[in-house]
Amino acid sequence: MLSSKVFSELLSKKGFNFYAGVPCSLLSGLIQIVDDNPETPYFPAVREDAAVGLCTGAYLAGKLPVLLMQNSGLGYCLNAFTSLNLIYKIPILVIMSWRGEDGNDAPEHIIMGEINQKLLKTSSMEYSVLSSENYEESLNTACQKIKDGLPYTLLVGKGYFNEGH
């Protein structure tokens, strides 16, 4: 487990200053911290592809965006990533909760939980699975890919971020 506050502060230190996404209970602690900070705007979206659009526009306006979403929305936003962000090298840091990890979740999350990494690989979207041991290294890798103009995904398992502390 990692403190949502500590991770949000690390994101700020790395220059991330715009957040959009679709709420997810596994990211609720991080979303609450970001939403409570007036220096880092958070824009909730109704679908993940709309959040990709918000983050893309923010990047083009000079911001460094973070997309907060659960993996069930990956299908919605893959077309936006492959036909816009990957082609035109518009980076976004994606923090994606991993619903259905290890087959443990509500039935509607199991299939996406089994295939989300395969979908990311097939779409040429690089990612790391966050752990308490690798979060700094993973974020550094993400920042390098973002400097190269590529989106990067940090997959977050259940219980990784605590509730707003």
Image (cartoon, rainbow, N blue to C red):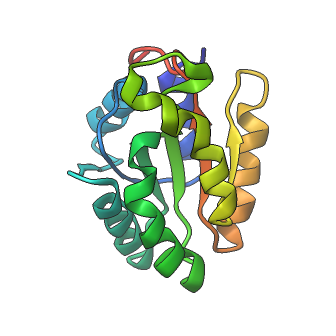
**Who's the residue at 59% across and 43% down the image?**
115
Quadrant of res 101: top right
What is the x, y in percent for residue 80?
42, 71
Q: Nearer the viewer, residue 88 or 101?
A: 101
Locate the N terminus by quadrant: top right
Residue 18 is situated, as x and y percent measured from the top left of the image, at 39, 55
Name the residue at 52% across, 19% down: 158
Q: Nearer the viewer, residue 118 or 11?
A: 118
Please, which residue is most extreme toward the left here? 46
Q: How many circles with numbers are drawn on the protein?
A: 0
Vertical relation: 62 (above or below) 156: below
Q: Using the image, determine if residue 119 lies above or below residue 107.
A: below
Residue 44 horizontal side relative to residue 105, left or right: left
- Name of the residue lying farthest toward the bottom: 88
Q: Residue at x 58, y 44 (%)?
A: 116
Q: Is residue 84 above or below residue 9?
A: below
- Residue 104 visible, this orientation: yes
Considering depth in this image, is 119 or 29 the residue closer to the camera?
A: 119
Q: Residue at x 34, y 54 (%)?
A: 48
Q: With 76 as the anchor, is 155 left or right in this view?
A: right
Most foreground residue, 109 or 15: 109
Q: Quarter of the image for the C terminus: give it.
A: top left
- Tell me if residue 59 comes above or below residue 118 in the rendering: below
Residue 4 x/y as whole percent? 49, 24
Residue 56's quadrant in the figure? bottom left
Q: Is residue 70 visible?
A: no
